[in-house]
């Protein structure tokens, strides 16, 4: 996923409506005199899927989709919500009914208008399980969602809770209260799509037609994705450059070498080999700020000895307590990460260092051995423990480090399992084909605890319908998430989110490791470097000195 910074924005429906009603766009139309002189080359990785917003759940595609599409709302650097295509989002009936009014005059890059149908058709397509879109679970609270998850569902079936009133009005009926609905409305899953997307989805995924700050030019697979400034964009994120060239790398080290050699303008992926030196490198501009990324690894419940039962929970807890997060952070991340104390990032209001049960995230070798022995009494351990990761990313050193801790503490065969590319790795994760534990993590799509917890661990996000790739299912946890979405205030919602986290700390569907800073580097010619609410770079702000 793309990296964004979460603040305390899990508010009640009424409070959100006050925030969204009447917020005006700060953007203006742009001229289209794109010039290569102000095209910014940036680090990219090959997207795991065609460029459909509702099927984009990883950084390679997320960075691209973010720049191409504009949704109902946008988020500022502090997590504040501002209308973009929406003119207002109004809630009633205890956050179970929303009326969305759209601004007129928006159009896609093919010249066709952005209307209520553009949003509703896109949402229906993403929510329908026949279309196998990874963000289907984002629509789980809308009436009719469950019907679209049936194995024999008609690919053209739609959400019964969505009604197009007119070209600029959408009526949304929910099956349960969802105060986070207006916050979710700026995520990838909620982006509009033109008619051409449904007439030829295969073609569209390779050459998307969009409505965001940039217009798609080309995608040379495993080489580059190019885009230019969209002259018809009317939103809040007006580009200060003429376009972006996402140069696709299979190694962050190669990208960093290109940056130092002047063949790349900007990267927000600093390789492990440069973490000790990038901030003192006089040939570059370096950036290191607090961010909203969480870094974890997942032990799926289908692995032998790791079911969602007493044995599996004991083994997960033992493995977690065998890892010295503080030492790894110091020796490998060099001041760019902090040990995790819960499942959230520090800026979010529900974040806490005082959760009951969070001792499972603290290094305690003797306790880890004790828990492992208890699990062995239930079923003796056999085999090896592996953690898979994509070798074209930055996980190698920390995965190997925690495997060494597990091996030395628990006296078992633990090893890292490299997979060549992000594409190969994510394909296996998304299809549920992993035969080992695997590195995981999250950069939020929208500023809400809902995004960290519901989208990753709720049952509605399992079975390929969302980010719950380990297929964790706990009705008690689900019930807490439902209560949070029905809460009348942020404070009340946070209480339920925190109770849900205490359940997660017992079950450990993923094992929290570190919260990562927003790090980046650019050539001296680049200015305007800024980060969004999740710590991701604001590409529209970049400019290049001529």
Image (cartoon, rainbow, N blue to C red):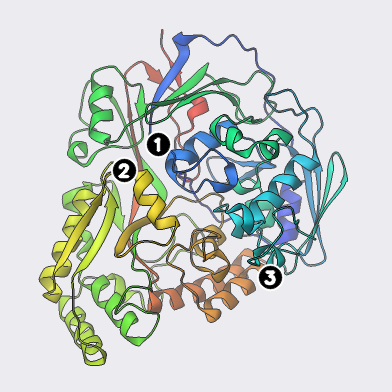
C-alpha span from label 3 to label 2: 41 Å
The foreground one among 19 and 317 is: 317
For image coordinates 25% across by 61% down, the residue present is: 387
Q: Locate residue 50, reporting x and y percent.
A: 52, 39
| Quadrant housing residue 403 | bottom left
Nearer mark to the viewer, of 3 and 2: 2
Q: Earlier in the sequence, mark 1 or mark 2?
A: 1
The foreground one among 328 and 338 is: 328
For image coordinates 15% across by 76% down, the residue present is: 410
Label 1 Cα neighbours within 10 Å, binned few <14 / some 14-19 / many ≥20: many
Q: Earlier in the sequence, mark 1 or mark 3?
A: 1
Nearer mark to the viewer, of 1 and 3: 1
Please say if the residues under marks 3 and 2 sit with CB atoms less than 8 Å apart.
Answer: no
For image coordinates 63% across by 72% down, the residue present is: 482
Disc 1 on helix, strand or loop? loop
Please say if the residues under marks 1 and 2 sit with CB atoms less than 8 Å apart.
Answer: yes
Whether residue 478 can be seen here? yes
- Residue matched to label 1: 46
Report whether 252 appears left or right of 96. left
Report whether 184 appears left or right of 410. right
- Residue matched to label 2: 421
Is 6 drawn above or below residue 384 in the view shown?
A: above
Is 358 drawn above or below residue 211 in the view shown?
A: below
Report whether 345 appears left or right of 299. right
The foreground one among 9 and 192 is: 192
Disc 2 on helix, strand or loop? loop
C-alpha span from label 1 to label 2: 9 Å
């Amino acid at each position: 996923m793309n990296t964004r910074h979460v603040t305390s924005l899990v508010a009640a429906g009424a409070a959100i409506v006050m925030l969204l009603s009447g917020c005006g766009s700060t953007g203006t139309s742009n001229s289209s005199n794109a010039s290569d002189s102000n095209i910014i080359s940036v680090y990219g990785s090959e997207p795991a899927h065609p460029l459909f917003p509702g099927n984009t759940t990883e950084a390679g595609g997320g960075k691209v989709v973010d720049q191409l599409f504009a949704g109902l709302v946008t988020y500022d650097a502090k997590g504040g919500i501002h209308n973009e295509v929406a003119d207002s989002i109004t809630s009633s009936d205890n956050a179970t009914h929303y009326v969305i009014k759209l601004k007129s005059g928006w159009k896609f890059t093919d010249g066709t208008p952005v209307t209520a149908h553009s949003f509703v058709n896109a949402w229906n397509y993403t929510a329908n399980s026949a279309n196998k879109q990874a963000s289907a679970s984002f629509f789980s609270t809308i009436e009719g969602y469950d019907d679209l998850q049936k194995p024999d569902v008609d690919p053209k079936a739609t959400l019964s809770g969505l009604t197009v009133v007119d070209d600029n009005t959408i009526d949304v009926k929910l099956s349960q209260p969802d105060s986070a609905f207006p916050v979710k409305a700026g995520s990838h899953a909620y982006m509009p799509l033109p008619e051409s997307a449904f007439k030829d989805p295969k073609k569209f995924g390779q050459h998307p037609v969009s409505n965001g700050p940039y217009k798609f030019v080309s995608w040379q697979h495993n080489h580059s994705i190019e885009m230019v400034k969209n002259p018809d964009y009317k939103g809040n994120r007006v580009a200060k450059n003429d376009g972006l060239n996402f140069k696709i790398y299979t190694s962050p080290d190669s990208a960093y070498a290109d940056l130092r050699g002047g063949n790349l303008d900007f990267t927000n992926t600093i390789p492990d080999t440069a973490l000790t030196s990038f901030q003192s490198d006089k040939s570059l501009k370096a950036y290191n700020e607090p961010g909203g990324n969480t870094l974890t690894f997942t032990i799926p419940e289908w692995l032998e000895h790791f079911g969602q039962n007493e044995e599996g929970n004991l083994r997960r807890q033992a493995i977690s307590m065998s890892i010295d997060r503080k030492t790894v952070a110091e020796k490998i991340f060099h001041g760019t990460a902090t040990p995790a104390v819960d499942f959230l990032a520090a800026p979010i209001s529900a974040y806490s260092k005082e959760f009951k049960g969070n001792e499972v995230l603290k290094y305690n070798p003797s306790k880890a051995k004790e828990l492992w022995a208890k699990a062995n009494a239930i079923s003796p351990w056999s085999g090896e423990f592996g953690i898979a990761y994509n070798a074209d990313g930055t996980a190698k050193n920390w995965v190997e480090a925690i495997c060494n801790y597990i091996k030395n503490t628990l006296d078992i065969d633990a090893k890292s399992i490299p997979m060549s590319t992000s594409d190969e790795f994510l394909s296996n994760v998304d299809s549920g084909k992993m035969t080992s534990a695997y590195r995981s993590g999250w950069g939020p799509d929208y500023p809400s605890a809902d995004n960290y917890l519901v989208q990753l661990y709720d049952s509605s996000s399992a079975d390929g319908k969302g980010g719950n790739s380990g297929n964790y299912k706990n009705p008690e946890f689900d019930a807490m998430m439902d209560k949070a979405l029905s809460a009348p205030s942020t404070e009340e919602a946070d209480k339920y989110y925190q109770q849900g986290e205490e359940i997660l700390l017992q079950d450990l569907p993923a094992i929290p490791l570190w919260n990562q800073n927003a790090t980046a580097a650019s050539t001296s010619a680049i200015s305007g470097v800024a980060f969004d609410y999740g710590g991701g770079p604001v590409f529209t702000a970049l400019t290049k000195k001529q």
